Amino acid sequence: MLRKLFFFVGVGLLVRSMMDYMRVENTQGLISYFSTHYILPAAAGMLLFVSVVVMKRRKVAENFQNAGSYNAMRELVLKVKPSELGLSSGNRFDIWGIVMEIGRSDVIETLVMSQDGSCSLYCSNGGGFIGMGEHKQVRQAAMYCLAIASHLKENFSEVSTFPLPSTKQVRFHFLTYSIPLGARAGLRQLEVGDHLLSPLYMAAQKVVKEMKIVGEKS
């Protein structure tokens, strides 16, 4: 913390000394010169430093609040029963929902797609899109993801927990009418098409793209 303070003050002093080589011939001029060219820049540097610290602390506080909302929403999505959404199926192994989570370096993105057409994107920093399934292009892209997942479900494993992904990892949670299924893969593998789940990942990215297009228009 002190190093940063000295850095900002030092920058203010160094910049002014390099920009001005004027000569000072009397005491009054000397005082005026140092007040204008050294003390004020130093004070400005200190003010900038304090502002940065305050902004960072405020951002951290906001992230804690957003994280609480994100975790609550995520838990709700993963534990909701299909009957509560008015969904039913003759096959208890049918997939009615997909939750794809990507671990970025500074945020976790959670994409939720449901058989009833609902589709949302939640981010651990508070961002995202909610209720995008009402838009046709988003809903169609999400339904395509569900279709791909249905063809791949034999490759998924039964799970009892829903851990968050680590950085550069993607976790898929498949919600069925009985036991939930899961899978995971490296982000890079999915992006280059070198994984069984790459088609599903690419289709999910299409969903996010359509969300962003709708968001830009609204």
Image (cartoon, rainbow, N blue to C red):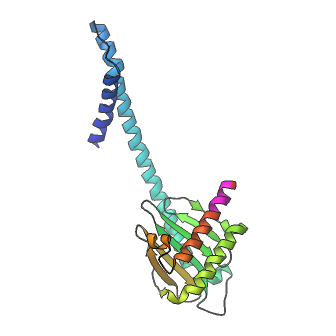
Q: Residue furthest top?
A: 26
**Location of residue 141 by image quarter:** bottom right
- Magenta highlight on residue 215: yes
Front residue of this view, candidates 218 and 177: 218
**Location of residue 28 by image quarter:** top left
Total numbered circles: 0
Image coordinates of residue 175 in percent, x first then y, are 56, 82
Magenta residues, as a range?
A: 211-216
Residue at 61 percent of width and 63 percent of height = 209
**Location of residue 105 by image quarter:** bottom left
Would you place residue 3 above or below residue 172 in this image? above
Residue at 45 percent of width and 63 percent of height = 104
- The N terminus appears in which quarter of the rendering? top left
Residue at 45 percent of width and 50 percent of height = 59
Front residue of this view, candidates 28 and 11: 11
Is residue 123 at least partly visible in the picture?
Answer: yes
Image coordinates of residue 32 in percent, x first then y, are 33, 13
Residue at 56 percent of width and 76 percent of height = 200
Is residue 218 at least partly visible in the picture?
Answer: no
Would you place residue 29 above or below residue 54 in this image? above
